[in-house]
Image (cartoon, grey):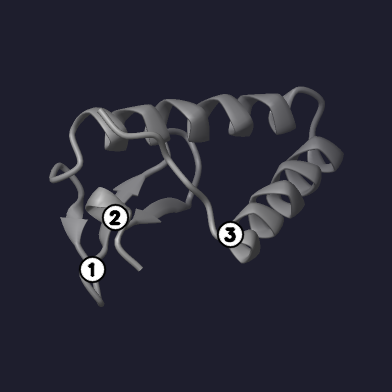
């Protein structure tokens, strides 16, 4: 099993969205963060599970939010 690595731009976007949800409604920042962590764990455990995307990427929806995790199986750039 490999670990997830995030591009700096993706990490910045994630932190901005956590802050957005935290400001929008009490508890939503943490709720979003946990949903993303669960989606990342799912992608690490089952890298081919996501729907095909562009440039060899996969996409998994983030449960409870109108966003998706976009990743490359095996961490290819």
The structure residue drawn at horizontal position 80% and vertical position 36%, both measured from the top left corner, is 22
Give yes or no for contact between labels 2 and 3 (Cβ–Cβ under 8 Å): no
Residue 10 numbered tag: 3
The residue that appears at 17% across and 55% down in the rendered structure is: 51
Disc 1 is placed on an element classified as loop
- Could you say which is closer to the camera, residue 56 or residue 20? 56
55 shown above or below 32:
below
Q: Decide if residue 72 is on the left or right side of residue 26.
A: left
Camera-nearest label, 2 or 3: 3
Residue 41 sits in which quadrant? top left
The image shows residue 67 at horizontal and vertical percentages of 47, 52
**Disc 1: which residue:** 53
Image: 34 above or below 43 = above
Find residue 39 and name its label: none
Considering the image in quadrants, where does the N terminus appear? top left
Question: Residue furthest toward the bottom?
Answer: 55
Q: Which residue is mark 2?
A: 59
Q: CA distance from mark 2 to mark 1?
A: 6 Å
Mark 2 or 3, nearer chain start:
3
Residue visible at 73% across and 47% down? Answer: 15
Q: Secondary structure at mark 3?
A: helix
Q: Residues within 10 Å of mark 3 (few under 14, many from 20)?
A: few
> Residue, x 73% and y 33% (percent of image)?
29
Q: Position of residue 16 (x, y in %)?
A: 75, 53
């Amino acid at each position: 099993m490999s670990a997830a690595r995030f591009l700096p731009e993706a990490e910045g976007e994630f932190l901005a969205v956590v802050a957005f949800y935290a400001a929008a409604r009490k508890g939503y920042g943490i709720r979003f963060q946990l949903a993303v962590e669960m989606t990342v764990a799912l992608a690490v455990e089952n890298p081919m599970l996501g729907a095909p995307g562009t440039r060899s990427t996969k996409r998994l929806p983030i449960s409870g939010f109108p966003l998706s995790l976009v990743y490359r199986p095996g961490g290819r750039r």
